[in-house]
């Protein structure tokens, strides 16, 4: 399937494409526009994977290897999705931190701040934690 033809595809075709890409059905109630966005992102990421390992090693050496590791509950390769004002934001969990819009960030809070323009708890913004009740 080509990314530029996703807009013309019917929902049943999108559902089948999702199953082929991920090996399981999509979450219940996912809208067709969201299916299209996520499928397009997945197709792009498979065609244009991240930085080569040797480059990442050189980069880590050049920066002294100082990176903040994501929470142990978040494994590299995982993805966080958040829709904000009609735009779906996809954050990939990496060994180095969190990748969003082609840049690696050390914290989810920095990404949430860029998206919203306000100070948010990153884990809370992405639905990983709830507000404590006091």
Image (cartoon, rainbow, N blue to C red):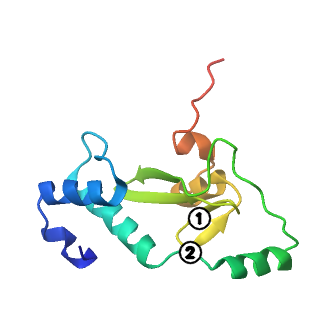
Farthest residue, direction top: 134
Which residue is drawn at the image coordinates 33% and 68% (left, top)?
40
Q: Is residue 12 left or right of residue 25?
A: left
Q: Which mark is residue 28?
A: none
Q: Quadrant of the N terminus?
A: bottom left
- Name the quadrant of the C terminus: top right
Q: Is residue 111 above or below residue 62?
A: above
Residue 59 visible in the displayed image: yes
Asked if residue 120 can be seen in this view, the reply is no
Query: Residue 96 sits in which quadrant?
Result: bottom right
**Disc 2 marks which residue?**
50
Q: Nearer the viewer, residue 105 or 20?
A: 20
Residue 99: mark: 1
Pointer 2 with pointer 1, Cβ within 8 A: yes
* Neighbourhood count class around disc 1 (C-alpha, 10 Å): few under 14, some 14–19, many 20 upward: many
Q: Residue at x 80, y 73 (%)?
A: 60
Name the image quarter holding residue 125: top right
Residue at position x 64%, y 51% in the image: 109
Q: Secondary structure at mark 2?
A: loop
Q: Earlier in the sequence, mark 2 or mark 1?
A: 2
Category of crowding for the residue at label 2, using alpha-carbon neighbours closer than 10 angstroms: few (below 14), some (14–19), many (at least 20): few
């Amino acid at each position: 399937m080509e990314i530029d033809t996703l807009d013309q595809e019917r929902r049943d075709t999108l559902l089948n494409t999702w199953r082929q890409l991920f090996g399981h059905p999509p979450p219940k109630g996912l809208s067709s526009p969201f299916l299209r966005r996520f499928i397009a992102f997945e197709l792009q990421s498979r065609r244009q994977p991240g930085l080569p390992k040797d480059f990442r090693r050189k980069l880590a050496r050049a920066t002294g290897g100082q990176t903040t590791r994501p929470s142990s509950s978040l494994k590299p390769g995982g993805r966080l999705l958040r829709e904000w004002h009609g735009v779906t934001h996809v954050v990939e969990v990496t060994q180095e931190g969190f990748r969003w819009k082609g840049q690696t960030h050390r914290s989810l809070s920095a990404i949430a701040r860029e998206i919203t323009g306000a100070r948010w708890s990153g884990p809370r913004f992405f639905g990983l934690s709830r507000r404590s009740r006091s």
